[in-house]
Structure formats: C-alpha cells, structure tokens
Amino acid sequence: MADEKHVFVASRWTGGNFFFPVRIEVTHDRVARIKPSLIGSDEESISMYKVASVNIHTGLLWADIRIDSSGGTNPILSHGHRKADAQAIRALIEGFQHGTPGAAD
C-alpha cells in the first residue's frame, strides 16, 4: 500500500519530549523524524532507499534510535521510544527495503 504510514511517538517522560514529543514516521518511500514546537516543527527525513543502517540502543525503560544514511547526510537520532516501537521501526524499514512491508506487522 503506497499510502501506508506508521507513526511512533516518543514518551513524554524522557528529556526534551514532555511538551512536544518527537514522532518517527515510516512510509514506503521515507523515514522522517518530526519534532513539533510551539510554532511549527522541525522535520528531517531520509529516503527509504538511502537508509544504510538502523542502530537501537536500549536502556532500562526506553530505547534510542539512530538511522544512518548512505547518502552522507546527518543521521536521524531520536530518544525515548518504547523498546517494542524501536524494534518495529527497524522491522518496517527492513521490510520496505526488501519489498515486504507486511513482514513487519
């Protein structure tokens, strides 16, 4: 499905996410990190075909995600996600890259 979008929101109980939590959006063509603010938002994205690796660092309660690009751009960094969400993000990215997004469900 071309219009399929999966949204993962960081926990409000982690640093920098209390008022405006970060969102990671994964679609068939890109992965985006969106940081809302009082006025507007800051968005960075990487084309699905340019994602080189997904690194997950898990702590006691939360996970940090680093998505690296093969195009030389800055990586997408996000912290404060549930461990299951971080693993789902990685599975979705790998599924979309291999053409089998249903494998991540």
Image: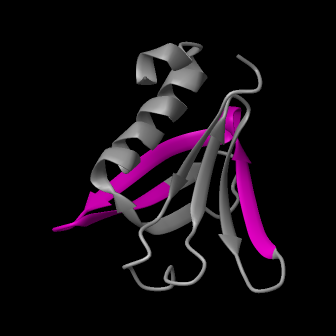
Which residue is at a point 76% across and 72% down the rendered structure image? 42
The quadrant holding residue 19 is bottom right
The foreground one among 86 and 39 is 39
Q: Is residue 8 above or below residue 100?
A: below
Q: Is residue 76 above or below residue 21?
A: above
**Colour convention:** one colour
The reply, left or right, for residue 36 in relation to residue 76 is right
Residue 58 position in % (x across, y down): 25, 60
The foreground one among 105 and 67 is 105
Residue 56 position in % (x across, y down): 34, 54
The foreground one among 38 and 67 is 38
Which residue is at a point 83% across and 77% down the rendered structure image? 40
Quarter of the image with the C terminus in it? top left
Residue 88 position in % (x across, y down): 40, 38
Residue 64 inside the magenta-drawn segment: yes
The image shows a total of numbered marks equal to 0
Residue 82 inside the magenta-drawn segment: no
The reply, left or right, for residue 16 in relation to residue 6 is left
Prevailing secondary structure class for the magenta stretch in the rendered image: strand
Q: Is residue 2 above or below residue 74?
A: above
Q: Which residues are magenta?
A: 41-66
Quarter of the image with the N terminus in it? top right
The reply, left or right, for residue 100 in relation to residue 69 is left
Q: Residue furthest left?
A: 60
Which residue is at a point 44% across and 76% down the rendered structure image? 12
Which residue is at a point 59% across and 60% down the rendered structure image? 23
Residue 89 position in % (x across, y down): 46, 42
